[in-house]
Image (cartoon, rainbow, N blue to C red):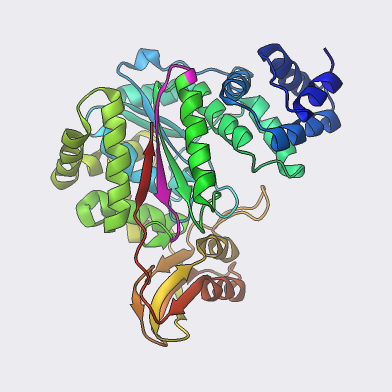
Amino acid sequence: MTPYQIILKKRNGGKLGKEEIEYMVMGYVSGEIPDYQMAAFLMAVYFRHMDEEEMAILTEIMARSGDMIDLSDLGGKIVDKHSSGGVGDKTTLVVAPLVASLGIPIAKMSGRALGHTGGTIDKLESIPGFRTSLTLEEFKENVRKYGIAIAGQTGKLAPADKKIYALRDATATVDEISLIASSIMSKKLAGGAHAFVLDVKVGSGAFMKEYDQAKALAKAMVSIGKAHGKETVALITNMHEPLGRFAGNSLEVIEAIEALKGKGDERFMELCLEIASRMVELSGKMGRQDAKESLKESIESGKALEKFRDLVRAQGGDERVVEDPWNVLPVANERVEIRASKSGYVSFIDTEKIGFSVIALGGGRKKKEDEIDHSVGVEILKKLGDPVKEGEPVAVMYVSGRSNVEEAKELIESAYEISEKRREKPPMIYEVIK
């Protein structure tokens, strides 16, 4: 077997077996197969796709290219969540302590910002002293002692995926469903959880702009999870507007803490409770409706907030953030309002532009090595369907000396469309794929 033969077979629409996929992936990781041949293979997959069996094989090979974390010694069934990325998506910061407050262990590895979307690890690092780089033993010990740990992914987790993703990024083969699904699920499998709840976002602020794309990705990831004996549920959710009120690292942590105090945005909390209740259901602890009621009680009693405090304490963060987030977290003092150009109703928000405005302010990365300014961000005052008067603020920018204020302002102004007719608000959760 040669790379040429495998590329030709896939180019012509053939189905690849395990030996052929393993030969290409591991040959590329070892350096035996050069970039140009792997790029040709990826392009062949891009145009010819992979079926469910091929995706499951590719996922397993990439997962097993590095460390496979074993969480079976933590007791209980570990359920993980994954979001396909959005603007203002601080869901993990609420869902993880919520689920852990019911005695279900949370051992979560999260990522950093990618493109216009924020990253959980960057948000947690807004908290002074908070450590996201943990050894595997520290990670597990925190779960044993506190019932919760959230850490950054190690470089040893699915290294084949990391190398292949870099090549996909350079060869315009990122947006192929079979490659996206395998990439995400390889890291999930390597992370050691026993079941998954996947939040697949669709809309102007998501990587998947079209519903059919989002549904295809959700189905692909569920099929991969099941092929590997992991119970997997995917929710297709709304990213036609920013999630919650804030986008930006410190600001999103503040919003998450407020949510755990029972003061969360209604639609944001709808999503958090749906994801959390499905995680509880997959853990086997109780049914979904009972879980929802128990989760609400956890917020009312303060148990969920205390679990967030446990997380902060366990990972070296300043616990005062729970009581006084606005003063403990770095928050830019200067505010700039963005005002409506006319009266009417908000009919469309280009949410991706809101995400890029946060980057322009300094709250994200234009290059991998860029340092994030945790203090900046955007507060969304007007969302889809909201009435607005000419000159009324639709958003507020939190800016620092490093911010490109004009660029951010132009992005937000052009993101909003206002019309005479009120548009019906789309649902938060469109569909559940099992």
Query: x%, y% of residue 97?
Result: 30, 38
- When asked about the image quadrant of residue 21, the answer is top right
Residue 96 horizontal/vertical position (percent): 33, 37
> Quarter-wise, where is residue 244 in the image?
bottom left
In the picture, the quarter occupied by the N terminus is top right
Tell which of 362 and 290 is nearer to you. 290
Whether residue 372 appears in magenta in the rendering, the answer is no
* 108 to 86, vertically: above or below: above
- Name the spot of residue 48 as percent of width and height, x first: 70, 33
- Rendered view: 109 above or below 205: above
Residue at left offset 56%, top offset 33%: 181
- Residue 238 is a magenta residue: yes
**In the drawing, does residue 227 fall left or right of residue 167?**
left
* Visible residue check, residue 256: yes
User: What residue is at 37 percent from the left and 13 percent from the top?
Assistant: 73
From the top left corner, tell me how far across and down residue 224 is, in percent.
51, 25
> Which quadrant holds residue 8?
top right
Closest to the observer, 27 or 377: 27
* The C terminus sits in image quarter: top left
| Residue situated in front as seen by the camera: 179 or 294 | 179
- Image position of 172 with respect to 361: above or below: above
State which region is magenta: 227-241
